[in-house]
Image (spheres, rainbow, N blue to C red):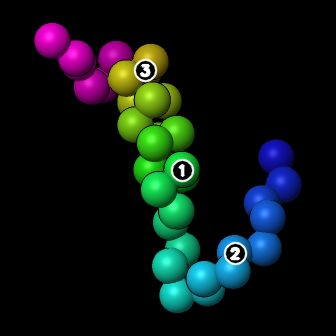
């Protein structure tokens, strides 16, 4: 997967990346939603 050039270099992690990580964690079972 290619990463687009971040227009905000001082903000390395975008909200989208955080959301993807969260979804991945949920799918992995390390995070449970009740």
Point out which mark residue 28 bears: 3
Residue position marked by numbered label 1 in the rendering: 16
Q: Is residue 15 above or below residue 6?
A: above
Question: Looking at the image, which residue is at 54% across and 51% down?
Answer: 17
Give me the C-alpha separation between circle 2 and circle 1.
12 Å
Q: Which residues are magenta?
A: 29-34
Q: Is residue 30 above or below residue 8?
A: above
User: Is 18 in the magenta?
Assistant: no
How would you rate the neighbour count of disc 2 (Cα within 10 Å): few for under 14, some for 14-19, many for 20 or more?
A: few
Q: Do the residues under discs 2 and 3 have CB atoms within 8 angstroms?
A: no
How would you rate the neighbour count of disc 3 (Cα within 10 Å): few for under 14, some for 14-19, many for 20 or more?
A: few
For mark 3, give the secondary structure: helix
N-terminal of the two: label 2 or label 3? 2
Count the labels in the image: 3
Q: Is residue 1 left or right of residue 32?
A: right
Q: Is residue 30 above or below residue 33?
A: below
């Amino acid at each position: 997967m290619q990463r687009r050039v971040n227009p905000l270099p001082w903000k390395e992690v975008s909200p989208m990346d955080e959301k993807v990580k969260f979804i991945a964690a949920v799918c992995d079972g390390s995070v449970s939603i009740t």
